[in-house]
Image (cartoon, grey):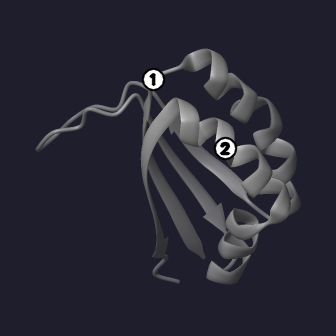
Amino acid sequence: MHYLIAQIEIADRETYSKYEAGFMDIFLAYKGRMLSVDEDAQLLEGEWSYTRTVLVEFPSKEDALDWYESEEYQSLVKHRFTSSKSNIVIVSGLD
């Protein structure tokens, strides 16, 4: 399994909602599984100034990249780009 972790600082919720409205249909078509969307993460160490933290799972790194690089997602993600700042990584599971 591979996991995508996103730290998102949402600045414009109205525009960001356009991203949210189209997200799940595209995400699910690429074998994604939503594990967590949290706007109240409990800080244990360091600094965490993000509005939202997201954890998702894909069967493979290729599936994650196919989703992220897809024409459908790239058309939608412009709403996130204009309404927020993000840090996003793909990490490998231990299985």
Secondary structure beneath label 1: loop
Viewer-closest of 49 and 41: 49
Residue at point 76% right, 45% down?
A: 76
Q: Quadrant of the N terminus?
A: bottom right
- The dot on residue 51 is none
The crowd level at tag 1 (other Cα within 10 Å; few <14, some 14-19, many 20+) is some
Residue 53 visible in image: yes
Q: Position of residue 38 (x, y in %)?
A: 47, 32
Q: Position of residue 92 (x, y in %)?
A: 48, 78
Question: Residue under circle 1?
Answer: 11
Instruction: Tell me which amino acid carries mark 1.
Output: Ala
Secondary structure beneath label 2: helix
Residue 27 visible in image: no
Q: As drawn, is 80 to the left or to the right of 43?
A: right
Give the answer, above or below, for where 50 lies relative to 54.
above
Question: Residue under circle 2?
Answer: 78
